[in-house]
Image (cartoon, helix red, strand yellow):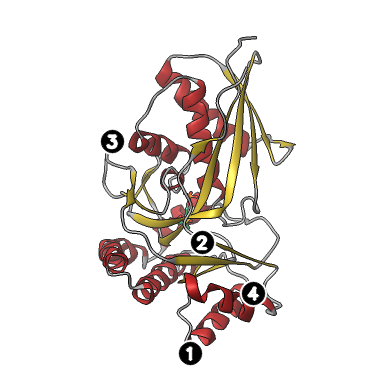
């Protein structure tokens, strides 16, 4: 047994306003397109790394020991950090999410961002935030963005490992994201499988990729001019194009359910009534609704009675990943 201290890190989830979908490089997990996200102040993952004398790492998620793919992904990630730091230390990794896991609510983003920070701290690897973001990207590309707070841009494309990092955007927006959960089940198509199927077989995928730089530029302009409606319009366009790549894959597949459509319709209706509300969906059925902060309470009140929604939460811009306490032996 070594006396390497336990380290606890926390990272918030983030939701892409302009979606990443498709990988340029599978081995280094480099996204084929850039993406833009909002880090959420209310959803997040706490990860504790405890050094152990075992031959393997173990991974406990939400109190349950994990075997199979989730454990392999964590082990592979730690192997990479050990290789880079020339250390052999194994760990018991204990993670807990304060929101549903693997349901398209960005648990891998907050999970790998917290793990990256805890692993580097445990193994005395001092990284800049940019390099920490590159490291987190290896676990899950969206995790690169959760290293940062507020709004984050993740560079993707035909890029090297060096070039594929996220950075925080300096502008702040007075917005909130309402999270309308539309199912309590875990998703059955992992995002990597979904994006690989889309990029291999959807005739729409090349169009999605070609238009991404313009969507990013338009979204950055909307942010710079504080235009929440313009940002919302581009955000809806982005999510609908991403999901169209799933519908048009061969065979087609979808992450939505009946409730997803029902909430999208409710958002459109609210908009007709004058609200500034726009939807976005990830690799799961839940609908996230972007709105100006001062309209959030009214929109929440309108959605409260909607029977399609299993839980209604809201979040504002959150901070980047951080250590929860000083290392303790
Ligand atoms: O990074 P991953 O593998 O969790 O994939 C994220 C995919 C989307 O959530 C649909 C889009 C995004 O940019 O976060």
Q: How crowded is mark 4: few (under 14 residues within 10 Å), some or many (20 or more)?
A: many
Residue 174 image point, x, y percent: 42, 66
- In the rendered image, the vertical position of residue 47 relative to residue 190, given as above or below: above
Cβ atoms under marks 3 and 4 closer than 8 Å: no
Mark 2 vs mark 4, CA separation in Å? 14 Å
Q: Which residue is denoted by mark 3 in the rendering? A: 162
Q: How crowded is mark 3: few (under 14 residues within 10 Å), some or many (20 or more)?
A: few
Q: Which residue is denoted by mark 1 in the rendering? A: 272
- In the rendered image, the vertical position of residue 240 relative to residue 273, given as above or below: above
Q: Nearer the viewer, residue 187 or 62?
A: 62
Mark 1 vs mark 2, CA separation in Å? 24 Å
Tell which tag, 1 or 2, sits nearer the viewer: 1
Quarter occupied by residue 195: bottom left
Mark 1 vs mark 3, CA separation in Å? 45 Å
Looking at the rendered image, the quarter that the N terminus falls into is: top right
Q: Which of 66 and 114 is in front in this view?
A: 114
């Amino acid at each position: 047994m070594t006396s390497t201290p336990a380290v606890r890190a926390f990272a918030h989830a983030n939701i892409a306003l302009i979606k990443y979908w498709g990988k340029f490089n599978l081995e280094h997990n480099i996204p084929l397109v850039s993406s833009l996200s909002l880090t959420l102040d209310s959803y997040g993952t706490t990860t504790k790394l405890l050094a152990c004398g075992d031959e393997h790492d173990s991974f406990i998620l939400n109190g349950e020991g994990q075997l199979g793919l989730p454990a392999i992904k964590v082990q592979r990630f730690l192997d990479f950090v050990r290789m880079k730091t020339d250390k052999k230390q194994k760990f018991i990794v204990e993670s807990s999410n304060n929101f549903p896991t693997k349901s398209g609510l960005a648990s891998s983003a907050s999970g790998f961002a917290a793990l990256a920070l805890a692993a580097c701290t445990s193994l005395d690897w001092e990284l800049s935030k940019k390099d920490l973001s590159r490291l987190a990207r290896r676990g899950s590309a969206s995790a690169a963005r959760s290293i940062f707070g507020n709004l984050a841009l993740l560079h993707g494309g035909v890029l090297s490992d060096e070039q594929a990092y996220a950075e925080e955007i300096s502008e702040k927006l007075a917005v909130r994201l309402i999270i309308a959960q539309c199912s309590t089940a875990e998703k059955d198509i992992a995002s990597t499988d979904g994006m690989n199927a889309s990029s291999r077989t959807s005739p729409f995928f090349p169009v999605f990729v070609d238009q991404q730089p313009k969507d990013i530029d338009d979204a950055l302009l909307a942010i710079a001019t504080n235009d929440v409606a313009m940002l919302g319009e581009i955000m809806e366009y982005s999510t609908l194009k991403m999901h169209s790549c799933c519908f048009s894959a061969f065979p087609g597949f979808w992450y939505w359910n009946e409730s997803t459509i029902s909430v999208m319709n409710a958002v459109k209706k609210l908009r007709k009534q004058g609200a500034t509300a726009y939807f976005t969906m990830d690799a799961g059925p839940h609908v996230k609704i972007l709105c100006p902060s001062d309209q959030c309470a009214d929109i929440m009140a309108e959605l409260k009675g909607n029977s399609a929604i299993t839980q209604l939460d809201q979040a504002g811009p959150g901070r980047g990943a951080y250590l929860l306490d000083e290392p303790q032996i």
